[in-house]
Every structure is written in C-alpha cells, then in structure tokens.
Amino acid sequence: MQQTTKTFSYHTRQSGFTLIELIMVIVILGILSAFALPKFADFSDDAEASSLEGARGAVRSASAISHAACLADSACNASGATSSTVIEGVTVDMVYGYPDKAGIQNAADLDGYTITPGAAADPLIIAVEGDGTPCFTYTIASISGTVITAPVISAPLTYDSTAATCS
C-alpha cells in the first residue's frame, strides 16, 4: 500500500501593513488625540496657580522664620519700627519683628516674580508674570498701641498691571 503525503504550502507574501490598516491606525490616533488633547493643552493656568501657591508658601515660611530669628537675635528689636536680622547670610530688614517689603523679598527669594512695591503704606504685590496672572499681597506688620499685628498675606487674586493692583 502506497501512502500519499500531501504537503501544504502556507506561503504568504505579505511583508508589511496594508494601506487600509495604516489608514485605520491614523483614524484611531486622530480620534484619541481629539479627546486627549483638550485635557493636556491648557496646563498654563494650573502651572501659574501652583507657582503662586509656592510663592505664597515661601512668603509665609520666610515671614515666620524671620520673626523667630528676630526674637532669638539680641541685636534685632522685635518691637521696633525698624531693625534687621541675618538669616543664612541674607540681611532681612524688619518692622515690628517681621520682614518689611524688601526684607520679605530677600527672605523668600522671590526672583522671577513680578513685584510691585507701591507706596510705603501700600501692600507689596507679588504676581506670577504680569497682567491677568494670579497674584497675592503682603501687608507689613503694624502696631496699635502695644499690640503688634502680624503681616497679612492675601488669598490669590488677579494682577492688573495698568492699575498696579491685585484684586
């Protein structure tokens, strides 16, 4: 008895993607990007808000650390209208034991922010970049009789460069 063997030839000549497969991939990527792009495109507002919160935190910390350094420094008059203390080699000008406008800029290292000092009685305005960006104010310490009021750091507001206000 003779046995016959059949040989099957699975010979394929395809060596890449067909045009339809490539078009389908492009269509799918287009659909995915249409949904994903809006979620990633506008991070500038979040970045500005985060930067401002970082600066506010730096100002709060610098104010507290400077106040503590002034209380610990016998040369610093914590109840005087003007004084100064040195923190890590940086001179911080003080008013009633807290940093004044120039002192808080030095202590918090606010380089890179738009800073509007205003008149002597006006608060210091710290903005992320410029017009329309988030900002906050730093009002120096004050005294009423014998009661010293700590500096006031405002909530985030919006900077108006033409009026030089943070409101």
Image (cartoon, rainbow, N blue to C red):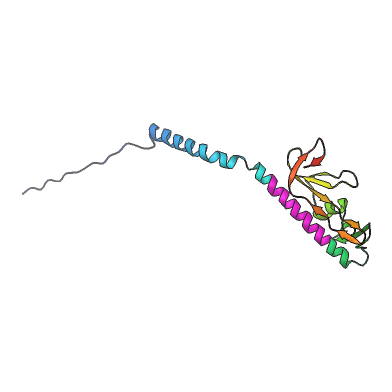
Task: Indicate whether 48 appears above or below 149.
Answer: above
Residue that lies at the very extreme toward the left in this rendered image? 1
Q: Residue 48, how many percent across, how many down?
A: 70, 45
Main SS category, magenta section: helix
Q: Nearer the viewer, residue 38 or 6?
A: 38
In magenta stretch: residue 61: yes
Residue 129 appears in view: no
Q: Nearer the viewer, residue 162 or 121?
A: 121
Residue 155 appears in view: yes
The structure residue drawn at horizontal position 82% and vertical position 58%, both measured from the top left corner, is 63
Q: Nearer the viewer, residue 164 or 1?
A: 164
In magenta stretch: residue 119: no
The structure residue drawn at horizontal position 48% and vertical position 35%, both measured from the top left corner, is 30
How many numbered marks have been drawn onto this rendered protein structure?
Answer: 0
Residue 24 lies in quadrant = top left
Q: Is residue 30 left or right of residue 54?
A: left
Q: Nearer the viewer, residue 73 or 2?
A: 73
Residue that lies at the very extreme toward the front in this rendered image? 145
The structure residue drawn at horizontal position 88% and vertical position 63%, both measured from the top left corner, is 70
Residue 132 lies in quadrant = top right
Q: Is residue 157 left or right of residue 31?
A: right
Task: Indicate whether 59 appears above or below 27.
Answer: below
> Which residues are drawn in magenta?
48-66
| The C terminus: image quadrant | top right
Q: Is residue 62 left or right of residue 18?
A: right
Q: Residue 60, how many percent across, how many down?
A: 78, 56
Q: Residue 130, how many percent across, how many down?
A: 76, 39
Q: Residue 16, how many percent across, how many down?
A: 39, 37
The structure residue drawn at horizontal position 63% and vertical position 43%, both measured from the top left corner, is 43
